[in-house]
Image: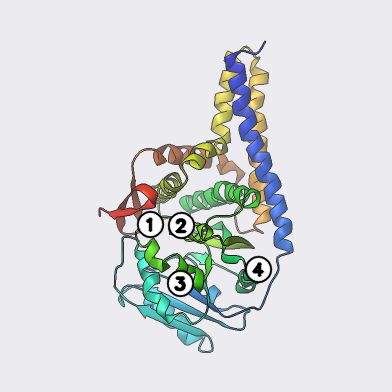
Amino acid sequence: MLNAFTILGLVLTILPAAYLVTAIVGAWQFRRILDRAPRHLGPGVTVLKPLCGDEVELLENLRSFCDQDYPDYQVVFGLRSDQDPAVPTVKQLIEELPEQDISLVVDDRVHGSNLKISNLANMLDRAKHDIIVIADSDMRVGRSYLQTVAAAFDDPHVSAATCLYSGSARDGLPSTLGAMFINDWFFPSALIAALRDELAFCFGATMAVRRGALEDIGGFAALVDVLADDYMLGNLVYRQGQKVALVPYVVSNIVHEPSMRSLFLHEVRWARTIKNVKPLSYALSSITEGLFLSVVAAALLSFGGLSGGLSASAIIVVAVLRLALHLVVCDTIKGQGAIAPWLIPLRDLMSLCVRISGYFGRKVHWREQVLTVGANSVLQDVS
């Protein structure tokens, strides 16, 4: 007869293993979807790129959005100061690509605690088109990006669209671990949610929205004090009874973390953001900490009377599946992420520490700001 230790040990083995199997199958399915992604030369598109400071390979990142195989689009860059280090990069692009519709807005007006959204609000008047595409400055895309995003709006019920993203590391261990967090944790868990349920939010890699839908939710003014602006933009559109589409395109996030401390603070911000907007999902997603749970499961199975070999099988099963997920995701994102299975234990230990830290405190670090996160992801600047 099974005792409580054995039952709990089996549960802590089966749940992480089931998640990993589901994630592996989901990644395989999405790979096939990517290979059949529709492309469409549709209506005019405005790309809004809010900027703040210089970043690794900023010129290459921004150029990728300015060099699109699309007939009618503009790119608007926004900054809060003409002394910002990103200004020369934008001016260089404007000189390099005179045939493209590229402009720069410098406006220091602050509309709320979220300076990125304040920047977007200052840029919106320059937008010429009805499809607005917003993407962070550390993202990079291929020339078919706008074609694939525009195809989502062929459905008249779609008022917002978004893309998953992968991590591509630059320079050192912190960056490699940061990219692995995106590829091994964010990508598969977000993909499961997107493939299983109707999407009700956006990801920061791409927030595409019809101008009318943006106006219906109150414009960027509805987001100026919100940390999870990507989530909330898509969610507010969804609440209006409109669809949010997952675009079959993976944007590349260029990851450069100068230190382990910066990486940890960055990931804690993500964790506290997710916990704030989706507390139940955050708690349930603990099953993604498979290696840690499998060690606990092995100990419980041993206490329950199973032999050491049988209890250790819990660790072996989860470890094999965890390795398989790492390899399958790297294959799905087409080489954007490094294959580094030897870093999985370190990466998963750090993820566990980040998860625990997400439960303690409301303070987050975002560029030069120190903020506290309140109910409904509302921000208060305490820097």
Q: Could you say where residue 342 lies in the image, as x and y percent from the top left?
A: 59, 42
Q: Say few, some or many: other residues with alpha carbon within 10 Å of mark 2 (under 14 / 14 to 19 / 20 or more).
A: many
Circle nearer the N terminus (1, 3)? 3
Amino acid type of disc 2? Met
Callout in the foreground (4, 2): 4
Alpha carbon separation for disc pair 3 and 2:
18 Å
The residue that mark 2 highlights is 232
The residue that mark 4 highlights is 155
Q: Are marks 2 and 1 in contact (CB under 8 Å)?
A: yes
The residue that mark 3 highlights is 49
Label 2 residue SS: helix
Of 367 and 42, which appears nearest the observer?
A: 42
Label 3 residue SS: strand
**Can you name the residue that lies furthest to the left here?**
383
Amino acid type of disc 1? Val
Amino acid type of disc 3? Lys
Q: Could you say where residue 323 lies in the image, as x and y percent from the top left?
A: 65, 41
Circle nearer the N terminus (4, 3)? 3
Q: Could you say where residue 69 lies in the image, as x and y percent from the top left?
A: 63, 79
Of 167 and 217, which appears nearest the observer?
A: 217
Residue beneath the point at 53% across and 64% down = 206
Q: Quadrant of the C terminus?
A: bottom left
In the rendered view, tell whether residue 249 sits above or below residue 95.
above
Residue beneath the point at 35% across and 72% down = 85
Of 210 and 38, which appears nearest the observer?
A: 210
In the rendered view, tell whether residue 222 sits above or below residue 211.
above
The residue that mark 1 highlights is 226
Callout in the foreground (1, 3): 1
Residue beneath the point at 58% across and 68% down = 141
Alpha carbon separation for disc pair 2 and 1:
8 Å
Callout in the foreground (3, 2): 2
